[in-house]
Amino acid sequence: MANYYTDIPELKFHLNNPMMKRICELKERNYRDKDEFDYAPLDFEDAVDSYDKVLEITGEITGEIIAPNAEGVDEEGPHCANGRVEYASGTKQNLDAMVKAGLNGMTMPRKFGGLNFPITPYTMCAEIVAAADAGFGNIWSLQDCIETLYEFGNPDQHSRFIPRICQGETMSMDLTEPDAGSDLQSVMLKATYSEKDGCWLLNGVKRFITNGDADIHLVLARSEEGTRDGRGLSMFIYDKRQGGVNVRRIENKLGIHGSPTCELVYKNAKAELCGDRKLGLIKYVMALMNGARLGIAAQSVGLSQAAYNEGLAYAKDRKQFGKAIIEFPAVYDMLAIMKGKLDAGRALLYQTSRYVDIYKALEDIARERKLTPEERQEQKKYAKLADSFTPLAKGMNSEYANQNAYDCIQIHGGSGFMMEYACQRIYRDARITSIYEGTTQLQTVAAIRYVTNGSYIATIREFETIPCSPEMEPLMSRLKKMADKFEASTNAVKEVQDQELLDFTARKLVEMAADIIMCHLLIQDASKASELFSKSAHVYLNYAEAEVEKHSNFIENFDKEDLAFYKK
């Protein structure tokens, strides 16, 4: 049977990135747990070995259980009866296998029953699972909501809720409402404090809630009467054991059928405040969404890998005109670009996760002791990098998942349109990735300030100083010219000083930045492991160079008066 970890050597390469030494040192607090927990690592090598073994177990479960169940789960889907959700039979088997293997609460401290893993190996597990079944990936990976509860909840909440997640209970984040999708400041689910019950009571409706009948929910609700903006919203913890929330229906979706997307009705549901009042949207949801966006980036990379695998296998097997279709330029061109996008997007994903790991670990240490000036500077640096890279990782990988799934079907030809081939499920599952947890357009809104304030170009220029292998030097030379065009395009738009023009060209500028950053990451990877990344570095740079040229030409020749042609 396939192992979804060991079969992909690129994953082990990213696990062994040099930044992991600092990440482990911070996450393990210089390996202090070794005296209290027999499964805690003794040193860096031991820590990475632990991650490697858990990833191998995840890959094995994915190959032997989750992947074989995927088509059945897609066909059966979850059921709703008497206000409760029942998972598809294959989903139950998947969850049981993951819980028995101890793959829940992975990033939580050992004192709560977690594995104390950094975000990076956990994100790899999420990618691996999504490559087999993106719908199940949603259910399993929502465990990372516990990060927000750990970060903002109090010690009593930690002791009551975190061990339950580590033991295998499920989570959801209840944000969206019928009239509040991307505009979360319009959330109106009402939270009223009851002196009689000594708790908050939640009333209203939530819609499009992934895994909405979960055991523990993080809920965004309006705690401040008379308010209508984000300043009146707080975050609450709802425990399903308390009752008061029913599933009105499960949405009938295009894809990710195994993942129940629910409409929830709250009727005096007892809940408790998480953190401080009025910071629900301003602070806590932003943290929750950043984690979720990294998760969707991982899901997208998993889908890209699945699409590439299916396309490659079919192209090798399918014969036309007396030879395998992989020998035709039209087909191997598609496959090469699919692999280039996969490797580039994965490099961006794990660069982002490593940035998140460092700043989150330092943030956690700051709750125990005062950071040194050097640590504060390090925390600030990586928080900014994580914030700037997250919308790129989510936005670009979700678009690439869709593009790779499209090309996978194209390689299959008419067979790809038939339901018996997995590529149609991958295609349907991929479509949501560029929509939920913030559309690609919203990722652009989050990223454009890092274009205009010079953060991306500064990072790019810093990457230019990193030595590369002789084989990669010609690519680096071309990449510097691409950066010059990006900088010139950015300056041209900024000089006009017109907000509408900036908003209109934002996606082009953000994509230019992302393309150049991913090229740099691929060149760095190919310089260390030519056998894994050299081909993708060449192919992706050719692709990205044309994309940068296209966007540069558009901006150079565009006049703000032309905006009139785009408006109705």
Image (cartoon, grey):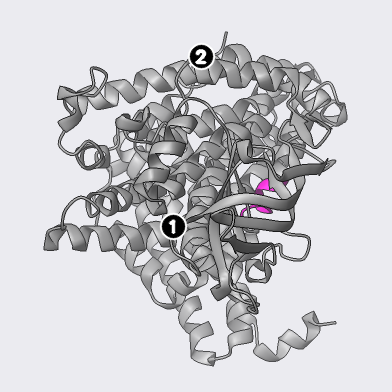
Residue 132 placement: quadrant? top right
- Residue on which the image places disc 1: 389
Task: Give the residue type at disc 1.
Answer: Phe
Q: Which residue is mark 2?
A: 60
Is 169 on the left-hand or right-hand side of 25? Answer: right
- The span from disc 1 to disc 2 (Cα, nearest Å) is 31 Å
If the image is split into quadrants, where does the C terminus sit? Answer: bottom right
SS at circle 1: helix
**Residue at the spot x=56%, y=60% of the render?**
195
Q: Which mark is residue 141?
A: none
Secondary structure beneath dot 2 equals helix
Residue 515 at x, y percent in the picture: 50, 56
Q: Are marks 1 and 2 in contact (CB under 8 Å)?
A: no
Q: Is residue 155 above or below residue 529?
A: below
Q: Quadrant of residue 422?
A: top right
* Neighbour tally class for label 1: few under 14, some 14-19, many 20 plus, Cα within 10 Å: many
Residue 508 in sight here: no
Using the image, determine if residue 24 lies above or below residue 147: above
Q: Nearer the viewer, residue 366 or 451?
A: 366
Q: Is residue 434 magenta?
A: yes
**Position of residue 259 measured from the top left corner of the image (x, y, whole percent):** 71, 35
